Image: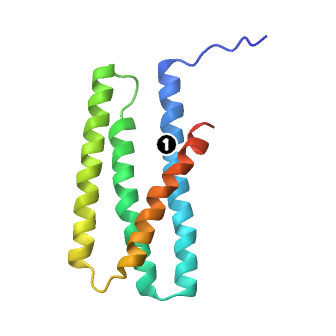
Amino acid sequence: MNDRKPLSATALLIAKKQSVFRFIFLQILCLFFISLGIIFFTSGLYWYSFVLGALCSIVPSVYMAWRVFGYKGTRPAKDVMRAFYRGEAGKLVLTAVLLSLVFLIIKPLAAGVFFAGFGIAILSHWLSPIVLNK
């Protein structure tokens, strides 16, 4: 028989917050090792194009996580939903701004490698169920 008590709301929030930030760390670590392979086998142009593409996906994800889980303690459901909506809206705007800035400011840029970094960072979200369930 299992006599464990269910987690309190605060303990559950702390556990989810740790899981989300652990996933973001894992995402950054994975992309770091891929970028090391790129700089080892190719030129610096491909390396910084890949890193910039990955950062255009990771930075908005960090913003979203901070926006949703950046508070201590529990909050009413209305405030949680508002944080999710604001975080997602900010993530979308931040992604568009970062992509625009990279294409306007960074010259030369290997667009294919840039979008490969961006795409791999987005596809790495598929790892989140594995990381968040632990």
Residue 111: which quarter of the image?
Answer: bottom left
Quarter of the image where the C terminus is located: top right
In percent of width and height, residue 110 lies at: 37, 82
Q: Is residue 74 above or below residue 113?
A: above
Q: Is residue 120 above or below residue 129?
A: below
Quarter of the image where the N terminus is located: top right
The 10 Å Cα crowd at callout 1, few under 14, some 14 to 19, many 20 or more, is: many
Outermost right residue: 1
Secondary structure category for the residue under label 1: helix
In percent of width and height, residue 94 lies at: 26, 55
Residue beneath the point at 56% across and 62% down: 30
Q: Choose between 105 and 92: the one closer to the eye.
A: 92
In percent of width and height, residue 12 lies at: 52, 25
Q: Amino acid at mark 1?
A: Val
Q: Choose between 65 and 121: the one closer to the eye.
A: 121
Residue beneath the point at 44% across and 86% down: 44
Residue beneath the point at 44% across and 57% down: 122
In the rendered view, does 107 fall on the left or right side of 9?
left
In percent of width and height, residue 19 lies at: 54, 40
In the rendered view, does 23 fall on the left or right side of 73?
right
Residue 49: which quarter of the image?
Answer: bottom left
Q: Is residue 80 above or below residue 90?
A: above
Q: Choose between 126 and 52: the one closer to the eye.
A: 126
In the rendered view, does 40 fall on the left or right side of 117?
right
Q: How many marks?
A: 1
Outermost front residue: 112
Outermost bottom residue: 43
* Residue named by callout 1: 20
Residue beneath the point at 52% across and 17% down: 8
